Structures are given as structure tokens and as C-alpha cells.
Image: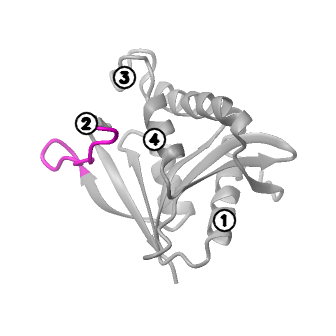
């Protein structure tokens, strides 16, 4: 079922905590679908994506955060990193609530992102190797291409944030979409 009433509204400070919790729940749901409760992809706090990671994305000076709205309800969120000098932008996070999966809402949100930033030359994003729904979404729905696979033989070297080393999933794909 396709929803046409998908829109993005800027994240309000009062909604920040719920945004973080909703994001963690959506990522946790994906891992549980794939691995069940015996998931070794959880961090020490039992999260697939840490609060620290989400907050770092939200607090970056070049970030934009939005709530995904469908039929008047908050059903997900998006965090973008916008480089106004190069127009090479990043989709840091996109999530929808598990109860609205497979309804075209994520795709509607992505179309809204592209409409919001028509100046973009290249979009880039990453997703863990086990997130088959995400891989399908980025490749087959949104027009991204896989350009790199990070693994122990080819590690993702993340720069330290706030003086601390970042730890991402062991295996991850990098996707790029070159805009026409």
C-alpha cells in the first residue's frame, strides 16, 4: 500500500528524546528480525545503534534532522549531513516505525529528502550487511549503488568523535547515489 501523504518536518527540541528512542527501537527491531534474541550485534547497552551515535549525528554542525509524518502521525525520522560547499551529502539515519514497514513510507520520505535538497550532486549512506530490508530499499527502490564493503580485511576507519574512538558494525556497505 502506497501512502502519498508522507512529509518531513524539522525535529523539535521537545521531541529529541522520543526521536532517539524511536530510532533505537526501529534498528533493534531489524536486528531481532534477522538474528533473534541471541544477537551479538548489540552493544554493551543492548542497542544496535547507540544513543551516543544518534546524538553525535543530531549535534553535528552540518546536520539536519526531520520527523517523517504520515497521515498526521510521527512514523520515523531522518538525519542528513549537508555539505553546502561540495553538495556531496550524507543520509546519516533513516528509520520508520516497525508497524508501518512495507507501506511506501520510507520511499516517500526519501523522495521528500531529495526534493528538499535538489542541489545535491551525490548522496552517500551506510548500512550493516545484515539489514537486508535496507539493502533492498537503497538499491532497488532509491537508486543507490553499493560502492564499498567494509569487513575485517577492509575496515571502516571512523574518525574519533569527542576524543573517543567510534565503533561501528564489523561489516557494512557504503552506498552512493549520483544525482542526474
Distance in Å between CA atoms under marks 1 and 3: 32 Å
- Please state if 72 lies on the left or on the right of 115 as rendered: right
Contact between labelled residues 3 and 1, with CB atoms less than 8 Å apart: no
Identity of the residue furthest to the left in this view = 153
| Figure quadrant of residue 43 | top left
Going 25% across and 36% down the picture, which residue do you hit? 165
Q: Which mark is residue 111?
A: 1
Residue picked out by circle 4: 56
- Viewer-nearest of discs 2 and 1: 2
Residue 136 place in picture, x, y as percent: 49, 53
Distance in Å between CA atoms under marks 1 and 4: 25 Å
- Label whose residue precedes the other's in the sequence (4 or 3): 3
Is residue 49 visible to the viewer in this orientation of the structure? no
- Please state if 19 lies on the left or on the right of 49 as rendered: right
Residue picked out by circle 3: 43
Determine crowd level at label 4: few under 14, some 14-19, many 20+ residues with C-alpha closer than 10 A.
Answer: some
Residue 75 place in picture, x, y as percent: 73, 40
| Figure quadrant of residue 145 | bottom left
Identity of the residue furthest to the right in this view = 72
Reply yes or no: does residue 103 show up in magenta: no
- Label whose residue precedes the other's in the sequence (1 or 3): 3
**Label 3 secondary element:** loop
Contact between labelled residues 2 and 3, with CB atoms less than 8 Å apart: no
**Label 2 secondary element:** loop
- Viewer-nearest of discs 1 and 3: 3
Reply yes or no: does residue 160 show up in magenta: yes
- Label whose residue precedes the other's in the sequence (1 or 4): 4
The residue stretch that appears in magenta: 150-163
Distance in Å between CA atoms under marks 3 and 2: 14 Å
Residue picked out by circle 2: 165
- Please state if 104 lies on the left or on the right of 92 as rendered: right
Amino acid at each position: 500500500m502506497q501512502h502519498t501523504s508522507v512529509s518531513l518536518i524539522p525535529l523539535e527540541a521537545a521531541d529529541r528524546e522520543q526521536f532517539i528512542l524511536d530510532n533505537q527501537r526501529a534498528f533493534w527491531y531489524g536486528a531481532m528480525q534477522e538474528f533473534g534474541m541471541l544477537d551479538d550485534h548489540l552493544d554493551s547497552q543492548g542497542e544496535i545503534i547507540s544513543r551516543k551515535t544518534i546524538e553525535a549525528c543530531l549535534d553535528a554542525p552540518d546536520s539536519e534532522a526531520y520527523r517523517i509524518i504520515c497521515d498526521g502521525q510521527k512514523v520515523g525520522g531522518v538525519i542528513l549531513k549537508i555539505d553546502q560547499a561540495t553538495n556531496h551529502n550524507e543520509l546519516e539515519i533513516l528509520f520508520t516505525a516497525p508497524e508501518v514497514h512495507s507501506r511506501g513510507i520510507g520511499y516517500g520520505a526519501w523522495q521528500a529528502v531529495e526534493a528538499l535538497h535538489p542541489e545535491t550532486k551525490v548522496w552517500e549512506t551506510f548500512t550493516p550487511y545484515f539489514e537486508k530490508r535496507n539493502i533492498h530499499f537503497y538499491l532497488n527502490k532509491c537508486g543507490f549503488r553499493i560502492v564499498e564493503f567494509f569487513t575485517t580485511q577492509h575496515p571502516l576507519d571512523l574518525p574519533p568523535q569527542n576524543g573517543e574512538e567510534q565503533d561501528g558494525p564489523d561489516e557494512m556497505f557504503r552506498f552512493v547515489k549520483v544525482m542526474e
